[in-house]
Image (cartoon, coloured by chain):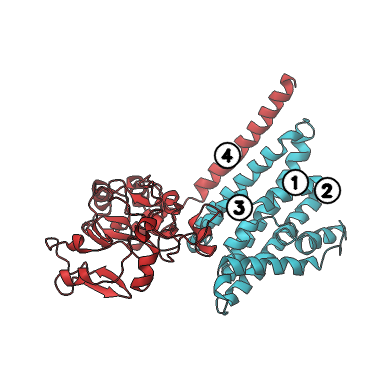
Chain colours: A cyan, B red
Amino acid sequence: MKLFLIFISAAIVNNFVLSYFLGICPFVGVSKKVSSAVSMGMAVTFVMTITAAVTWLIYHLILVPFNVVILEYVSFILVIASLVQLVEMFIRKISKPLYDTLGIYLPLITTNCAILGLALFAVLREYGFIESIVYGIGAGVGFTLALVIMAGIREELELANVPKHFQGAGITMIVAGSLALAFMGFAGLISI
Amino acid sequence: MDVTALLISMGSMGGLGAMFSAGLSIANKKLHVDEDPRIEQVKNALPGANCGGCGFPGCAKFAGEVVLDDVEISDCTVATQSEIDEIAEIMGVEVEAAERKIARVMCQGGTYETAVKADYAGIESCLAANLMSGGDKLCEYGCLGFGECVDACQFGAMYMDDNGLPVVIEDKCNGCGNCVGACPRNVIEMHPESDKLFVLCKNFDDPKTSRQLCTKACIGCQICVRAVEDGQMYMEDNLAYVNYDQYGKEAKLPTDRCPTECLVVLDGNEEAAEPTAIQEKAA
């Protein structure tokens, strides 16, 4: 039950994008088309899940026993950067068009604060190994969810008659704010 | 802080790094993608300025487009002729020489020339001033004078003169067009190097209004249009235009005929004319 609650908490109630406001850069940058939003979400989910597992191992098997918890940030970034490199190579291998669509946002997963935030939150909340992984999957699914909702709205927005001064970035920010407000409705549903 | 802690830190981080790099290099071998080797060669031959003048995010992307998508090599405005020749050799094609383009500031309304409507105390940026009821100058079409274009220039080819107007150093201009995009008033235009005659004004107001706004405004008097042969210049919306297709290089340049000195020849080391203050003229 606890695992399920962690998953729902990370994916919806405490959505990384819409209630913690982490990872806003790809949220705005890759949310023009649903298809690329789904692939981006999947790439981030993969990186998040593996990061959650590997950082847990590093934290509990290296940093804590050797009393070098100060190196938390350095080692976590190291993990994330390597994983993103791997994902980049993989995507480039399997689908060149997808690689081109994601463009600069793919290597930028490295600097996506949602992923570092995930690793740090998992440590802060003293999750176990399995819990960390579930937390990572939940956070990734939540990120994908936010990205896909946003992309769906923006695809419709392309056809909408937006007032001149709201066009482009303006209306995107307003939509993002409204989405965040909507997700505020889940606040307090699960306290974990 | 003792030495052991230091060694443990170094050891653990070094170990992790080595582990990951080993993993990545294996993955790199396994997931290697065969790429056209010419992309790398073209990329190395490009200037590497990443200015975006070609319309692609950077030189690497441009190189890919040149090799795979038949984008013209001469779209790179920064590359010198020898660099373009080198790329053409890699690609095994002939290139037509594209004429060099230079950014031209199409406004002479500096601090001295223009009438002011208010004291602007906002953010020192053209974009902000343009949003904020159009800056401090009365003219709604001219240069705002906060140097957004100068900041946009990566090549140091622009500076702001004492009169608050941007100046393009022709020798340094690579024609990337970043300044054109930076200007909220569309005052800067790209012109081929061989175009020398310009109407340096963008004001569409009627003659009376434009005369009150700026001492160097085009007032639509048509003197220049009458001074040249038919079709070489024309009037539209109170503004004179040079028809570059028909304007021969040898043709007579009627610059001295312009009463407001806004028809000028820009040719390299032109000395700036004495500014005429709008206050003096009104007095």
What's the residue type where badge 1 is placed? Leu
Q: CA distance from mark 1 to mark 2?
A: 9 Å
Q: Is residue A40 left or right of residue B205?
A: right
What's the residue type where badge 4 is placed? Ser
Mark 2 vs 3: CB contact within 8 A: no
Q: CA distance from mark 2 to mark 3?
A: 23 Å
Q: Chain of mark 1?
A: A
Q: CA distance from mark 3 to mark 1?
A: 16 Å
Q: Quadrant of residue A183?
A: bottom right
Q: Position of residue B251 (x, y in %)?
A: 12, 63
Whether labels 2 and 3 belong to a single chain: the reply is: yes
* The C terminus of chain B lies in quadrant: bottom left
Residue at 83 percent across and 61 percent down: it is A4
Q: CA distance from mark 3 to mark 4?
A: 18 Å
Q: Mark 1 against mark 4, which lies toward the viewer?
A: 1
Question: Is label 3 in a helix, a strand or a loop?
Answer: helix
Q: Position of residue B156 (x, y in %)?
A: 38, 44
Whether labels 1 and 4 belong to a single chain: the reply is: no
Q: Which residue is mark 3?
A: A109
Mark 1 vs 4: CB contact within 8 A: no
Q: Is residue B188 visible?
A: no
Q: Position of residue B71 (x, y in %)?
A: 33, 61
